[in-house]
Image: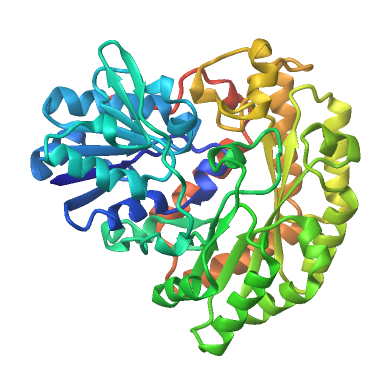
Amino acid sequence: MRVLLIQPRPRDGLGFKSVFCTEPLGLEIVGAALKEHQVSLWDMLDETSPANIIASFRPQAVGISCSFTVDVYTVINIAQVIKEMAPATFTFVGGHHASLCPEDFFYPFINAIVTGEGETTTPEMLAVLEGNQDLTNVSGLILNLPEGQFRTKNRIPLAQLDNVPLPDRLLTADYQQKYYLGFRRPTAAVETSRGCPYRCNFCSVWRFHRGKVRTMSPLRVVEEVSRLKTKEIFFTDDNFLVDISRAAEIAGLIKKQGLPRKNYIFQARSDTIVKHPDVVKQWKEIGLDHVFIGFEKIDEEGLKQVNKHNSVENNEKAFKFLKSLGIGVYASFIVDPGFTAKEFQKLLVYINRLRIMQPYFSVLTPLPGTELFSQVKSRLTTLNYEFFDLLHAVLPTSLSPQEFYHQFTNLYKQAYRKPGHLFGSMQIFFQKLFNRNLSFDHLSKLFYGAKQTINWKAYLKQEGGSVKY
């Protein structure tokens, strides 16, 4: 079959949307699992119209990723347009949000929702389609029928992640230069584990993976890394150090095999970093460049409220330790909608005291599918998914909306206008410029995003980021 896979993209430039643009790893893996089919991948980073895509490729099946809540309306819209253009096309949706909230996609122009791991369910679904057999026998599907949604048997998650096919990056060859983390371009994404053992109430990862953690073997991880030509590598695991001995073995194998030096970035918990400094040093030796740490809150009570099961002391120790090694830290903080001006100021004082150079701020958002959403659903001020982007308050604010966003954007203004940060940014800028890793389009996106992020009025616009075709 001719199968088209689609990755939606946000269209405005607030916050993370302009700073990060990672490759559609999930679709690359699904595409790799469909070797018996003719597969094309459309990343909506470009301005290609659906009409051109449909006319040139003539897909028989179209799969659309919906991992993020803010993409829901774009996914629904593009599925409808495709069905109108090619009524015989089988359309299906997958991803985190789709799996946790399949009811959001109950439309006649969407045939099925693939829940859980798409690389196992999708090939079987397409084989059944080709054979004109009964889709109700395929585990892991929700079928949209005239009388309602029909859920097939649950599919058992993969026991061995080494069986996950290597991502087919040929599908995104035309887009690779457009994937970046800030000035770091191009950046490759690598998944080495799935799930998280912790139960933060604002996160749906542990629910999506049914409370389990599965990992790839060190050999499988290093095999994928060895195939990457790009210097910047981002490990997408929610906690790369979840199995500390495995993390140490991966670093050891990379060094032993003498792989070209890379700049590695991963996410990790501060308590793990504090407990295992030797493993972090081992990674620093082979190129660990930055670590994402979810500080979340600046006091113990705040951490308890989000069920973080960590401490402020660990956050600070990990930050100082990484800084002493010359490893950068992306520190993320959650801003509660109930913040007063005094609490905004306390957060800013905290960041200044620790001299955190790269803080990121998000608004506490009860994403559908999370424990938090179930707890506060009755208090939501909107169910418009375009505002569930971690940057808009969807719960009542103590301050007026104007003052809340003024205070929120001031966090970025004060944190990123420091001389030290500006000097460091310029150093990276000129280094990337010298190595020809920057483009005008890339710089314009970063500049526009930065400008929008500190403009409090941009957060009050009522139009969303979905695109109408």
| Nearer to the camera, 466 or 280 | 280
Residue 311 image point, x, y percent = 87, 48
Which residue is painted at 44% across and 40% down in the image? 116
Which residue is painted at 46% across and 71% down in the image? 220
Whether residue 325 sits left or right of residue 6 in the image: it is right
Which residue is painted at 16% across and 22% down in the image? 84
Hey, which quadrant is residue 242 in on the image? bottom right
* Vertical position of residue 412 compared to residue 424: above or below: above
| Nearer to the camera, 450 or 180 | 180
Residue 121 image point, x, y percent = 33, 44
Residue 273 visible in image:
yes
Hey, which quadrant is residue 307 in on the image? top right
Give the colour scheme of this rendering: rainbow
Which residue is painted at 41% across and 53% down in the image? 25
Residue 319 image point, x, y percent = 80, 60
| Nearer to the camera, 431 or 209 | 209
Residue 79 image point, x, y percent = 26, 28
